[in-house]
Amino acid sequence: MSSKGKKFETQAIRTQMERSQNLEHSSPIYMTSSFVFEDAEDMRASFAEEKQRNIYSRYSNPNSNELIEKVCKMEGAENGFAYASGMAAVFSTLAALLDAGDHVISSKSIFGSTHTLFTQFFPKWNIETSYFDANDLSQIEGLIQSNTKILYAETPTNPGVDVLDLEMLAKIAKKHDLIFIIDNCFATPYLQQPIKFGADLVIHSGTKLMDGQGRVLAGITVGSGDLMDKVYRFSRITGPALSPFNAWVLSRSLETLAIRVDRHCENALKLATYLEGHDKVEWVKYPFLKSHPKHEIAKKQMKAGGCVVAFEVKGGLEAGREFFDSIRLLSLSANLGDARSIVTHPASTTHSKLTTEERNAVGISDGMVRVSVGLEHIDDIIADIEQALG
């Protein structure tokens, strides 16, 4: 069903696979491992890639195809691949494009598991990574080597909600012929489309705001056709594909992405504004607060500030522990982008594998709190945080 030229919300709802003979209104789930062929020639031509069709759900499935098409339209991408988790998307995308001896330049402010890939696993294959400060993009060109292949970043960052200038990153990547990859998980394609600013590939953990209810694990990479062909061929062989059921769940979730994210952002800005005036809070960071160091860049490339607010409780580690132990309504969890608000202590959870020095270098203090602001009434969210701070 064509939705060319339609608005974001319409594409999210009306991008669907072709209806079957049953004329269903909502897409069915294709819970099948494989697909049959009409005859020997059909089978030969399909495996020879002379025709595009479903062969095996590790390669493609109608549900994952629908999800990929939907996200490609949202991001302005040519093609994509859907994965069993966000980290499967990150690893498979990078591994498909990197060779032994290659070099990556990455922001220091990235998800802890991605950092572990760069520091513990890729070096086994003689792939090295150099880090730049998310708040000082002028460092990047000094890190470029003759074997540098990829420029990688996420914005807003996890968990410090720093904002990187996508347009500037893209100019550097283009100047030095680097593949520019952005993790767009915190923003979603509703708030930010990095390809419009020059990114080659965009990665999402669908587990977060894309699902929005903490139900399924998923990841997706979308971008240019040439690069995605390499990513597809690696992923087809290595087998990290998304299940048909999870793809179906995510495709349904995307129908409500815009309206959900609007409320997430509205609640998050109200919470950030409240925290900014609290006498027991050292500092607050949220992209659409005027006090955010990159507020103007955030407004240039994002529709709103997202669902994540970072702040520090005065009193250090002990005060932070007391705060978490006093939470009553909000969930203590490592997830984010859920309908339920979540508080996380990054230093002891999502970024615990980093050393203290590495955490400090990206602004993750012992007392930092990450709040994924959910869809409850904002008065109830604030009341719980108020009593925990008190």
Image (cartoon, rainbow, N blue to C red):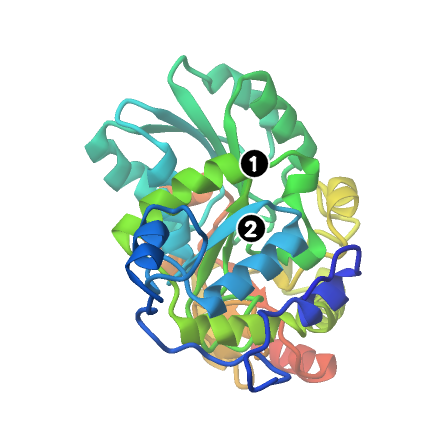
Q: Is residue 215 above or below residue 227?
A: below
Residue carrying label 2: 160
Mark 1–mark 2 Cα distance, whole angstroms, equals 24 Å
Q: Which quadrant of the figure contains the N terminus?
A: bottom right
| In this rendering, position of residue 122 left or right of residue 168 | left
| In this rendering, position of residue 203 left or right of residue 259 | left
Q: Going 35% across and 61% down the picture, which residue do you hit?
A: 55
> Percent from the top left, x then y, of residue 144?
46, 17
* Label 1, residues with CA under 10 Å away: few <14, some 14-19, many ≥20: many
Can you tell which quarter of the image residue 256 is in? bottom right
> Percent from the top left, x then y, of residue 310?
59, 58
Q: Going 66% across and 56% down the picture, which residue do you hit?
A: 74
In front of the other: 48 or 189: 48
> Percent from the top left, x then y, of residue 373?
62, 70
In front of the other: 11 or 363: 11
For residue 285, say whether it is visible: no
Amino acid on which disc 2 is placed: Gly
Q: Is residue 260 above or below residue 101?
A: below
Q: Is residue 306 above or below residue 200?
A: below
For residue 58, say whether it is visible: yes
Disc marking residue 200 = 1
Q: Which quadrant of the figure contains the C terminus?
A: bottom right
Amino acid on which disc 1 is placed: Asp
Is label 1 or label 2 in front?
1
| In this rendering, position of residue 131 left or right of residue 10 | left
- Residue furthest toward the top? 146
> Percent from the top left, x then y, of residue 259?
73, 72
| In this rendering, position of residue 60 left or right of residue 288 | left
Can you tell which quarter of the image residue 121 is in? top left
